[in-house]
Image (cartoon, rainbow, N blue to C red):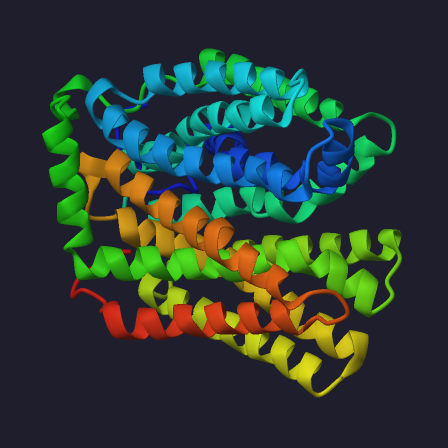
Amino acid sequence: MSRVVEDVRTSPGVPRTALVLGGLTAFGPLSIDMYLPALPRIADDLHAADATVQLTLTSFIVGLAIGQLVLGPLSDSLGRRRPLLAGLALYVVGSLLCAISPTSGVLIAARALQALGAAAGMVIARATVRDLFSGIAMTRFFSTLTLVIGLAPILAPVIGSQLLAWTSWRGVFYALAGFGALLLTVVTLLLPESLPPALRSPTRVGSALRAYARLLGERSFVGYALASGLMFAALFAYVSGSSFALQGVYGLSPQAYSLVFGLNGVGIMISGVVNRRLVGRFSGHTMLLSGLVLAAVGGTGVLAAVLLDLGLVGLLVPLFLLVSAFGIVLPNATSLALAEHAKSAGAASALLGVLQFVIGGGVATPLVGLGGPGTALPMALVIAGFAVLALVVSLVLNRPAAGRTV
C-alpha cells in the first residue's frame, strides 16, 4: 500500500481503508464527547468538585496535543504502523485505567494516558492518507473519510447518554476500551505499512522541531490549518452548548434533541457526498471557500435567530447549514494543508490536529460556558464568531496556487 493512488474512485479497498482510518480519526471526538453526559455522576461517585472533574477534559486535550506533536514526526521516522499499534495498545490501557479509577486524581492522569494513545490514531490516520493518495484523489478520499468521522462529535453524546441509561459512568470507559481493542485488531490484520523506508526522515528531535518551524513559516499551511481549526471551534461550540440551549431554553425533550443531532449528522454526510462529486470540477480552494461561506452564513444566522428571537425553527435551519458545511470544509482544508508535505506528512498532520482540538476544545468550549444558564447567546456568539473568523482567515492567508491539482 505504499504506492500513491491517483483516482480514488477506481482504487480497490478504498471503503475498507476509509472505515479503518475513519475509526482512528474518530478517537478524539468519541473520547471527549461520549463521557460528557457522565460528568455529574463522576463528581458524585468520586466525591469531587465539578471543577476538579472538568480537569479530566483538560488533561485529555493536553495529552492529545502533546501526543500528536510527538507521534507525528515519529511516524515520519519509524513508519506509520509501529507507532500506531503502540498508540492503540496505550489507548486501551488508558481507557481501562479510567474505568477503574478510584479517585479523581487517578482519573485525570488516566485520561492523559488515554489521550496519548488516541493521538496516535488521529495523527497517523491523516498522514497515511497522504502516503496513499495525492491530488484530487486525496481530497476525494478525505471526503469519504468525512462520512465516517463527521458523525463522531455529533452522535457521541447521544451514545454516551444511552450507555448511562443502563450502566455507570465506568461503563462508558469500558466501551471506549472495547472500541480501541477492536481497532487494534483491525489495524493489525488489515492496515499494512504505508511509508516505505526510503521515504522516512531521520529520528532526531532537531529534525522534528525544524519541520514544525518550516510548516509554521508557510503562509498557505497556516491558513488552511487555521481555517480547519476555527471551523472545528464552531462545531465544538455547537456540541458543547446545544444540549443546554435546545433543551433548557427552547424546551426540546431529550428524544427530540437526539433527533436534531441525528439530522445535523445527515447534513454532514450529504455535504460530504456533494463535495466528493464536485471536487473534480472545482479546485479544492474554491470548494473550501464555498464551505466556509456556508458556515459563516449559518453561524451568523444562528446569532440572528437568538438575538431576534426567531424561535426554534429559526435557530435549527442555520444550525443545519453550519454543521453541514463541516462536510465540505474538513476534507478540502485537510487535503490542501497536507498536499505539499509528502515527506513530513506526520508533522503536518500533527500541527493540523493540534490546532483543531486546542482551538475547539481548549478555547471554544470554555467560552460557551461563560454565559451562565437561561440563554443561548454565548453559544450563538461563539459559533458565529469562529465561523466568520475562519472565512476571513482563509481569504487573507490562502491563495490558490497556479496549476495546483487540489
Nearest to the observer: residue 362 or residue 181: 362
**Residue 340 makes an appearance in the image:** yes
Where is the C terminus found, in terms of image quarters?
bottom left
Task: Return the x and y of residue 146 as percentages of the image width and height.
Answer: 51, 47
**Residue 135 makes an appearance in the image:** no
Nearest to the observer: residue 327 or residue 91: 91
Work out whether 12 lies above or below 320: above
Residue 123 placement, left or right of 100? left
| Residue beneath the point at 40% across and 32% down | 125
| Residue beneath the point at 13% across and 21% down | 198
| Residue beneath the point at 63% across and 42% down | 33
Where is the N terminus found, in terms of image quarters?
top left
Residue 212 placement, left or right of 125? left
Which of the 4 image quarters holds residue 199? top left
Task: Return the x and y of residue 196 as percentages of the image width and height.
Answer: 21, 20
Task: Return the x and y of residue 140 as percentages of the image width and height.
Answer: 42, 48
| Residue beneath the point at 66% across and 24% down | 173
Work out whether 88 lies above or below 268: above
Mark count:
0
Which of the 4 image quarters holds residue 182? top right
Task: Return the x and y of residue 215 as percentages of the image width and height.
Answer: 18, 48
Residue 340 placement, left or right of 25? left
Q: Farthest bottom residue?
A: 308
